[in-house]
Amino acid sequence: MNFLKKFYLVAPGPTPVPHEVLLEGANETIHHRTPQFINIMKEAMEGAKYLFQTTEGEVYAFVSSGTGAMEAAVQNLLSAGDKAIVVVAGKFGERWRDILKAFGINTIEIELEWGEAVRPEDIKKALEENPDAKAVFTTHSETSTGTVIDLERIARVVKDTDAVLVTDAVSSLLAEPLKMDEWGIDVVVSGSQKGVMLPPGLGFLAIRGEKAWKLVEQSTLPKYYFDLKAYKKKAPENPYTPAVNHIYMLKKAIDMIKEEGIENVWERHRVLGEATRKAVKALGFELLSKRPGNVVTAVKLPESIDGTKLTKIMRDKYGVTIAGGQAHLKGKIIRIAHLGYMGPFDTIAAFSSLELALKELGYKFELGASLKALQEYFAENLKG
C-alpha cells in the first residue's frame, strides 16, 4: 500500500523553516531604496546583533551562502602574501584553507583527524611559532564530523596577540553558545539556512573591534561585491540590491528567536543533541566526533551497512532526509541534525525511519530501541 508521504528535513542545512517565516517572505516585494524598506533592513540588521551576541560590532548580510561570507572575511582582512593560521579538521576547515590559498595567503595549517577538535594549546603553539600571523581561521562546528571546538578558550588565547580570530559559525550560530563581545571574537561568519531558520540565500559577516577594522583598512586583496568598506559606508542600506523578501523573513525569525530567548534556544539544541546521542548508543552505534556538539550528530556505521543506501531508503521510501558522509567518509557515516526549527518529534520521526531502513538492510537490533531511549530522555527533560 502506498501511503501519503510527509517529508521531514533532518539534515544540517537547509533546515526546516517555520510557516510564519515563510509567509513573511510572501509579502509584496518593495523597492530596496525606499524609506519603508530601509527601515525594515535597519531593524533586521540591528536585531541580527542579538544572534551573534554583540553590541560592539556590526553585522552585514550578503546575497550568498555562508561560503560567500567566508570568502568576504578573507578578502577584507588580508593582503596577498600575508600569513594566516587555519584549522583543518574536516570539510569546512578545508574550505577555509582553499579560500585562503585561492587568494595567495601563506597558510599555516593545524591539521587534525576528522572527528578531533583543535585545542587552545594548539592555537597558542601555532601563534608562538608564527608571531607574524595576521589571523586565525577556525570552524566552530565542523558540520562534516559533528565536532564543536572550545571557542571561548581559543578566543582567550588569540585576544592578546596581534592576530584576529575568525570563526565559521555557519552551522553553529544559535545551536551552540557563541558570545562575540564577551569572548572577544573579532569576526564571525554564518548563513541563513541553518539555526536562523530561513531558506538559503543570506550570508552574514559580523565584525567588531579596532584590530579587525584596521586589517580591513590595510587589505589589498581584490574585492568588489564583498567590499566591507562599501557596506559600512552605505549602512543601513546595502550598496547593492539586497534579498528583499529574505530580509522580511530574517526580521520575523529574529523576532521569534528574541521571544524564545537565546539561552532557551541554546538549551533546546542541547536537549535534542543529548537525546540523539542516547538514541545512537541504544542502537549499538558509535559517534564519530571526540567532542560532539548540538548541531549535528555524526554516526559511525558498521561495514555491513552502506550509508549511501541507508540515506536513500530513508529519503525515498520514508520521506526523511538526513545527511551522509563527505569525502573519505562517504557511505561510512550518517549525520542527523537537531538544528534550527526542529523539535522532539522531528528526532523521533528520524529515528523511526532510521530503524525501518536499518531493518531492511539486515542490521540486527531490537526494534524500537532508539525510540525507547528518546522517549525516556524526553519524558525526563521536557517537564514543565
Image: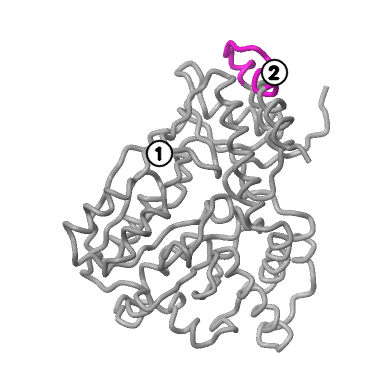
**Which SS class for mark 1?**
helix
Please identify the quadrant where the N terminus is shown: top right
Amino acid carrying label 1: it is Ala
Q: Is residue 349 visible?
A: no
Q: Which quadrant of the structure image shows residue 220?
A: bottom left
Residue under label 1, please give it: 327
Residue 4: image quadrant is: top right
Please state the horizontal and vertical placement of residue 263, each as a whole percent of the image. 63, 54
Within 10 angstroms of label 2, few (less than 14), some, or many (20 or more) residues?
some
Amino acid marked by disc 2: Gly
| 104, 338: nearer the viewer | 338
Q: CA distance from mark 1 to mark 2?
A: 31 Å
Which residue is rendered at x = 47% and y = 19% of the image? 302
**Helix, strand or loop at mark 2:** loop
147 inside magenta stretch: no
Task: Give the x, y percent position of residue 381.
Answer: 69, 35
> Earlier along the polypeptide chain: callout 1 or callout 2?
1
Is 339 located above or below residue 113 in the figure? below
**Residue in the picture at 42% in, 67% down:** 187
Quarter of the picture holding the C terminus = top right
Q: Residue at x 49, y 83 (%)?
A: 232
Of the pair 320 and 57, the residue shown nearer to us? 57
Residues shaded magenta: 358-372
The disc placed on residue 368 is 2
Q: Residue at x 58, y 19 (%)?
A: 283
